[in-house]
């Protein structure tokens, strides 16, 4: 999916919501556990229920890898099930020497048919470039993450005034433009969005951390939005586990719709 197509979906649906498919077998409603593939069954119902309110889905691969070969199968089936007009993110946080990264890229872009994969920048240019070699596919590079540990390295000063995450953003912008590269910036880092927009005015930002991690949707929208929206805001647990009972899909839909309605206001106000 191109940047233009993604923005078209956002204006059409009045939404920049990404639903995180962090499907934990321990947390899915008990009536689904007897299904042939409970994880896929859960995802299918969540996708059907939330499709009107979001533009992207982001399965975090850990939740699938944790159950072995069957989990990979559920992940593949899930990505195949998501309709073509949605942006599909494999949240795998990969990155290795070039030779190895190339195979990670094939796994997620060719086998899994994802549009994008999350990549860690720590190993530098040759670890990221193989992911950028795939036409019409995206790298989403970890820049300033939502977790407390983001303070351990990412915000440390690299030069007298520049923290590491700023260097990640400016250096990676020389590897690829805003048509192939996005950055992860946590919703919990709202005070940094203004600065990040100065460094990366055109790039899309994947913003996880709304809902369970307490990020402020209004604040990040106000400071993070650009002329093409430029934001993909992810919520996982707050949506998919809105209920642990038989009504889980209906409750997920209600939660996704409430976030979408808020987003429609911010699109009107800040775009
Ligand atoms: O790359 C990510 O998606 C990511 C980056 C980050 O900085 N923080 C973060 O929470 N995530 C992921 O986003 C999802 C957040 O889940 P919830 O906190 O349940 O909404 C998880 O899959 C995380 O792994």
Image (cartoon, rainbow, N blue to C red):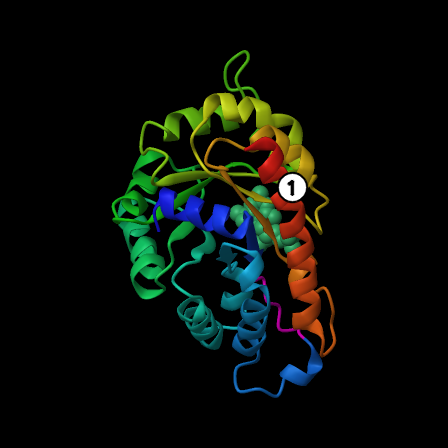
The location of residue 179, given as percent across then percent down, is 34, 38
The location of residue 244, given as percent across then percent down, is 73, 72
Q: Secondary structure at mark 1?
A: helix
Q: Is residue 101 left or right of residue 153?
A: left
Task: Tell me if I can see residue 175 in this picture.
Answer: yes
Span of residues in magenta: 21-28
Ligand 1 within 8 Å of disc 1? The answer is no
- Residue at figure coordinates x 30%, y 51% from the top left: 100
Q: Which residue is mark 1?
A: 265
Q: Is residue 262 above or below residue 36?
A: above
Q: Is residue 247 left or right of residue 12?
A: right
Q: Magenta segment, principal secondary structure?
A: loop
The location of residue 213, given as percent across then percent down, is 70, 47
Q: Is residue 165 magenta?
A: no
Query: Which quadrant of the structure image shows residue 195?
Result: top right
- Residue at figure coordinates x 66%, y 74% from the top left: 28
Query: Which quadrant of the structure image shows residue 269?
Result: top right
């Amino acid at each position: 999916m191109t940047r233009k197509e993604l923005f078209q979906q956002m204006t059409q649906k009045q939404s920049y919501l990404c639903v995180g498919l962090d499907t934990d077998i321990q947390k899915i409603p008990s009536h689904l556990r007897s299904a042939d593939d409970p994880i896929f069954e859960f995802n299918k119902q969540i996708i059907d229920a939330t499709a009107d309110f979001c533009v992207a889905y982001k399965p975090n691969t850990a939740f699938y890898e944790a159950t072995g070969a069957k989990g990979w199968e559920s992940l593949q089936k899930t990505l195949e099930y998501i309709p073509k007009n949605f942006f599909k993110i494999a949240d795998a946080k990969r990155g290795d020497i070039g030779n190895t990264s190339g195979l990670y890229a094939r796994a997620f872009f060719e086998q899994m048919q994802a549009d994008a994969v999350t990549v860690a920048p720590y190993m530098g240019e040759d670890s990221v470039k193989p992911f950028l070699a795939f036409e019409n596919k995206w790298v989403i590079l970890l820049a300033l993450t939502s977790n407390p540990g983001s303070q351990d390295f990412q915000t440390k000063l690299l030069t007298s005034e520049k923290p590491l995450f700023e260097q990640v953003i400016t250096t990676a912008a020389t590897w690829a433009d805003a048509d192939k590269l996005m950055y992860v910036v946590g919703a919990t880092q709202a005070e940094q969005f203004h600065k990040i927009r100065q460094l990366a005015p055109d790039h899309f930002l994947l913003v996880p951390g709304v809902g369970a991690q307490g990020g402020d949707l209004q604040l990040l929208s106000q400071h993070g939005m650009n002329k093409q929206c430029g934001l993909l805001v992810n919520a996982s647990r707050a949506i998919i586990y809105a209920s642990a009972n038989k009504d889980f899909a209906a409750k997920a839909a209600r939660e996704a719709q409430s976030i979408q309605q808020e987003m429609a206001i911010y699109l009107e106000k800040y775009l």
